[in-house]
Amino acid sequence: MENKDSSKISRGDLLKGLVKKGGLMMLGGLPWAAYVEENKEEEFVLRPPGAVDEKKFVESCIKCGICVEECPYDTLKLAKPGDDALTGTPFFTPRDIPCYMCTDIPCVEACPTDSLLKDLVSDDNDKYNIEKAEMGVAVIDRKNCLAYWGIRCDACYRACPLLDEAIVLNFERNKRTGKHAMMKPEVNADICTGCGMCEHACITEKASIFVLPREKALGKVNDDYIKGWDKEDESRLDSTNIYIDKNQVEKSTLDYLNDTGSLLNDE
Ligand code: SF4
Ligand code: SF4
Ligand code: SF4
């Protein structure tokens, strides 16, 4: 994406230079550390792609607004007093304007601080890959989604830039009518970027699919549960405190977790 005008480049470059030299460590006479101290992270706010976790984000964002200026779709806004986000920090509201997942991610490219990190939205070869963004995850309200009523609607599915990956349609027989098919959307949280194009497209009065920050939408499993069928997850065994007795070492993790024999034999 081309920059909208060259003055922004120089402003961004200037700020990058200043930040590197610590030139913005004071804000209106208030020491930066004290200023950050007052800032609390916001729980339900959606940040731009590449944003570090919320706590670090509110500490590192200098509220310069460069990412907002560089966004070609006016997706990003700087929070005003009364908005859900901390005043001056960038956020977006997908129902109004989603993130259109620019392949060159100008918001990240322009950020002069470590608030938006290229590494978080790049492949191993250091090339931008917006599909790695984790802005949030879409959640479906099955009570109000028309497709779950049996009414034909695939607006969110069609709007998704990762169609058939981030959202799939599951076909089911409509038990109520006995003769129609239902096409129920389902989100794959491993692929969904949280761009919000689905939320923007949803045709119900209040969106029945909406994006939440991943920490809010997803649960968390204790470290000692391991997917024995997943080699990558199984490798976590090396770094956990799970006790495996000598008789079990030859077995796969899946066998181990499914074997209740040792539990039954315990005194
Ligand atoms: S990637 Fe999204 S937030 Fe960033 S500039 Fe593009 S539309 Fe705006
Ligand atoms: S995220 Fe980066 S570019 Fe955007 S306002 Fe904060 S410091 Fe500036
Ligand atoms: S937020 Fe919606 S449109 Fe965007 S990737 Fe996830 S499911 Fe697809």
Image (cartoon, rainbow, N blue to C red):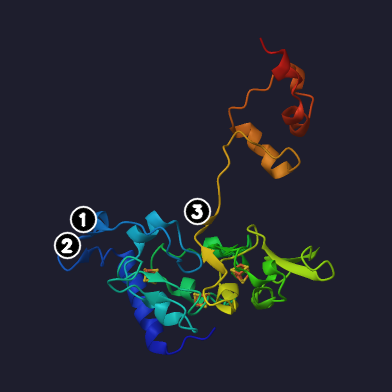
Q: Is residue 130 in view from this perspective?
A: yes
Label 1 sits on a secondary structure element that is helix
Q: Do the residues labelled 1 and 2 touch (CB within 8 Å)?
A: yes
Is disc 3's CB within 8 Å of ligand 3? no
Disc 2 residue type (three-letter): Leu
Viewer-side label of 2, 3: 3
Disc 1 residue type (three-letter): Ala
Look at the image and tell me in which quarter the N terminus lies.
bottom right
Q: Is residue 101 in view from this perspective?
A: no
Q: Give the vertical position of 97 relative to 176 (above or below).
A: below
Which residue position is annotated with label 1?
34
Rounded to the nearest whole Å, what is the CA distance between mark 2 and mark 3?
32 Å
Looking at marks 2 and 3 on the same chain, the residue that comes earlier in the sequence is marked by: 2
Is disc 1's CB within 8 Å of ligand 2? no
What number is the disc on residue 30?
2
Viewer-side label of 1, 3: 3
Q: Horizontal and vertical percent for residue 220?
A: 55, 45
Q: Badge 2: how crowded within 10 Å, few (<14), some, or many (20+)? A: few
At 82% from the left edge and 71% from the top edge, which residue is drawn? 180
Rounded to the nearest whole Å, what is the CA distance between mark 1 and mark 3?
27 Å
Q: Give the vertical position of 264 relative to 211 (above or below).
A: above
Which residue position is annotated with label 3?
215
Q: Are marks 2 and 3 in contact (CB under 8 Å)?
A: no
At 33% from the left edge and 58% from the top edge, which residue is drawn? 59
Q: Using the image as rendered, state which of residue 238 and residue 88 is in the foreground.
A: 88
Q: Give the vertical position of 9 relative to 160 (above or below).
A: below
Label 3 sits on a secondary structure element that is helix
